[in-house]
Amino acid sequence: MTAVAQRVPRTDRFGPRDLLAEAAAGIGARPGRLVLTILGTVLGIASVVVTVGLAQTAAGQINKQFDAVAATQAVAKPATNRGFDGNARSLAPLPWDAPDRAERLNGVDAAALVAEVDAGDRDITAVPVHDPSAARVTSPTLLATTAHALDALDGRVVQGRFFDEGHDARGDRVVVLGVDAAQRLGVSRVDRQPSIFIGDRAYQVIGVVDGMVRRTDMRSAVVLPMGTARTDLGLTSAQELHLHIAVAAGPVVASQLPTALNPNSPETVTVQAPPSTSSVRQSVQADINTIFLALGAVALLIGGVGIANVTLLSVLERVGEIGLRRALGATRRQIAAQFMVESVVVGLLGGMVGAALGVAAVTTVSAVQSWTPILDLRMVGVAALAGGFIGLLAGLYPSLKAASIEPISALRGGV
């Protein structure tokens, strides 16, 4: 007897293809709402990409500035202690030939002594005649330095020239004015050999300088050679030795300079030198990233809340549809999966668009500021995927809410 095989009809299944089709239909049914829904995620992801990208770019610019200025500057001062009266006293003065000693060290490009000079009751003016009826004007600051101050302090000559070692050794009565001091004293040109007066002594102005990033007060000061200050104004010691050093030479210079300046008592010299640039870069990068990531997290939270609200609203509007599908055999899992996929797809769309906008914004800002944009492409990819993750979290409650709807209650118009 021949047995006839009977085929058992397959039950209808709601497969992945059907799930994606239903989710796509639900998403595309309201294009205007879709745009508003993904807008929050777009802004959130774009904020993360922009903030992290600009943080990395800004950190790179700060590091460049550090390398150009702070990493190449060091200063030595006499060590001090406090006496019985509580006043700080120097243990030993810096030697007058301190620049020459410092420049013998490896890594030191230039060195210069700097001292504040007490002019006493001498006025610093541009004219020798004083008008008793005129209001008294505060004199500019008076500083003394050695010949290589421009190189040590990253200054530049605006007009004329800076004094040299010959002026310093002879004690010539010449001065250099900072740009602000020159304006204050009314000296606009030095080619006419103008002079200023310190008390009743005339000093020829041979140059005007600017810059001096380590001693910005020099821009508003009258600067004269160290030898001139010792001869004419009784200067007894210098307060600081400024050095221009090679990048990353700070620790070596800090360890060797005290011995070079005072071999018998190196403890009488204190040196302020920059740390290694790597530690500074890490510190700057960490601080900036922490601030900007916190702002990006807030933006993402706002975007996630927006997706959750719109998804929940969609569930409430489609109660009848959900009830009909449940009555036709759809399971709670299938209903929940549909709304979950819709939420994830919306999040992914927002993440990809936001990541693209963020990259474009970082590139545009960097181009406008003439910066070098720094972007980690892995971070951009993770940011785009983060949109899907935000959508997953945002759609969790609305999906569970949709799955909990009973067919009878839904068809009657309740939830």
Image (cartoon, grey):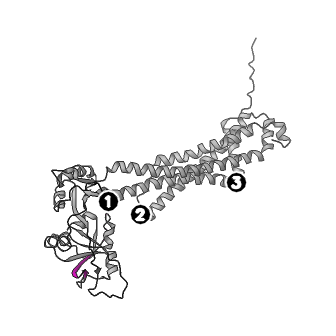
Q: Amino acid at mark 2?
A: Ser
Secondary structure of the residue carrying numbered label 3: helix
Q: Amino acid at mark 3?
A: Arg
Of 268 and 301, nearer the camera is 268
Q: Which residues are magenta?
A: 196-214
**Residue designated by label 3:** 33
CA–CA distance in space, label 1 to label 2: 17 Å
Of 219 and 364, nearer the camera is 219
**Dot 3 alpha-carbon crowd within 10 angstroms: few under 14, some 14 to 19, many 20 or more:** some
**Residue designated by label 1:** 68
Residue 177 forms part of the magenta stretch: no
Name above or below for residue 214 compared with residue 389. Answer: below
**Residue designated by label 2:** 370
Tell me, yes or no, if residue 350 can be seen here: yes
What is the residue that sits farthest to the right in this orientation? Answer: 412
Tell me, yes or no, if residue 73 can be seen here: no
In the rendered structure, the answer to whether residue 385 lies left or right of residue 30 reads: left
Q: Earlier in the sequence, mark 1 or mark 2?
A: 1
Q: Earlier in the sequence, mark 3 or mark 1?
A: 3
Name above or below for residue 108 compared with residue 123. Answer: above
Question: Could you say where residue 60 lies in the image, as x and y percent from the top left?
Answer: 39, 55
